[in-house]
Image: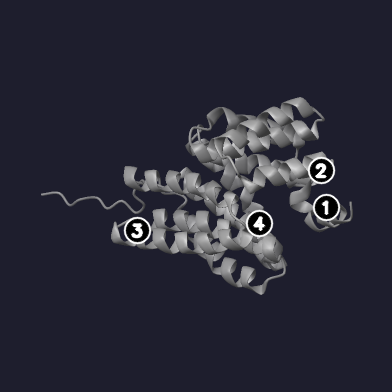
Amino acid sequence: MSAAIAIAVPSLTNKEIETIKNIIDDRIEFTRLSEKDALSASKKYLEEKQLYAATNGFSEQAKIIIDNLLATEIISHLYQLDPKDPEIKKFISPKVEKAAQWLEKNKKESGVSAYLYCTTAEIISSGLGYMTMSEIMSYGLKIKDYFIKATEIDSSLAFAYSGLAQWYYHAPGIAGGSTKKAYSNFELAYKNASTKGEKFMANIYMSQSFFNQKKYDEANKYLSVADSILPESKLVSYIKKLNDAGYSYFYYMVNREEVEKKLKNS
């Protein structure tokens, strides 16, 4: 009688994948709330999903993906409320370390999911501003590679293309950044978007890509689609306000203090 061969990293189950997709969809619902309410709701939602994953026997990989997705959500609200909040570093550091170390340990295993790669890249990106230089050198340089690997594993994963596009957009040219590559990956995200959450974000990113290219009619068209997907989204409303003042959402993401000061004084 032959012994069963143990699989070090089993592929995600259908139930795990469905849960992950639902979380990606649910994340956009927080944009209907104030930042304070969204922070409270996302923390509660993380606890609920952690319990759900534990009671349903989810794999370690699936648990890390869920943690990555919702930790990134929580960090975004903490940042919007107070980017200097010491809780951000305290909260994110162990999440980044756990995800990155698990991925590096298991990356040669065939069962590692594209979701693990892109959510790990996403959470590292969220924490870069709170890392030491040694941490940035250890983790930060892997972001692009993780997003690319995710698209190689699943060439139809819109979530991965959106992340890769943002990396290309914000990275300096000397490090490989390229607005041309950013726009082409935003388009791939748009073409491959299949869930509500993916479609919502893909239309926002397409809108702001066109806004940066001064194609304002196209920008408004895609932003209107995002608005129709999720009515009463405060994110869409705020992007409209930014655009009316001459700023793209991409510009705001890295120049928040400057933009908010000018909007306040206008």
Q: Quadrant of residue 159?
A: top right
Q: Distance between the residues labelled 2 and 1?
A: 8 Å
Who's the residue at 54% across and 38% down the image?
A: 198
Judged left or right of residue 250, residue 96 is: left
Q: Give whichever of discs 3 and 1 has the lower sequence position.
A: 3
Provide the secondary structure element on which disc 3 rests.
helix
Residue beneath disc 4: 140
Question: On residue 29, which mark appears?
Answer: none
Colour theme? one colour
Residue beneath disc 3: 52
Who's the residue at 70% across and 68% down the image?
A: 132
Q: Residues within 10 Å of mark 4 (few under 14, many from 20)?
A: some
Q: Give whichever of discs 2 and 1 has the lower sequence position.
A: 2
> Which three-letter amino acid code belongs to the residue tagged 3?
Tyr
Q: Is residue 186 above or below residue 234?
A: above
Q: How crowded is mark 1: few (under 14 residues within 10 Å), some or many (20 or more)?
A: some
Residue beneath disc 1: 259
Q: Give whichever of discs 3 and 4 has the lower sequence position.
A: 3
> Which three-letter amino acid code belongs to the residue tagged 1?
Val
Provide the secondary structure element on which disc 1 rests.
helix
> Which three-letter amino acid code belongs to the residue tagged 2?
Tyr
Q: Distance between the residues labelled 3 and 1?
A: 40 Å
Q: Nearer the viewer, mark 4 or mark 1?
A: 1
Along the line of sight, the residue nearer the viewer: 36 or 121: 36
Q: Is residue 87 above or below residue 257?
A: below
The answer to whether mark 2 and mark 1 are in CB contact below 8 A is yes
The answer to whether mark 3 and mark 4 are in CB contact below 8 A is no
Residue beneath disc 2: 247
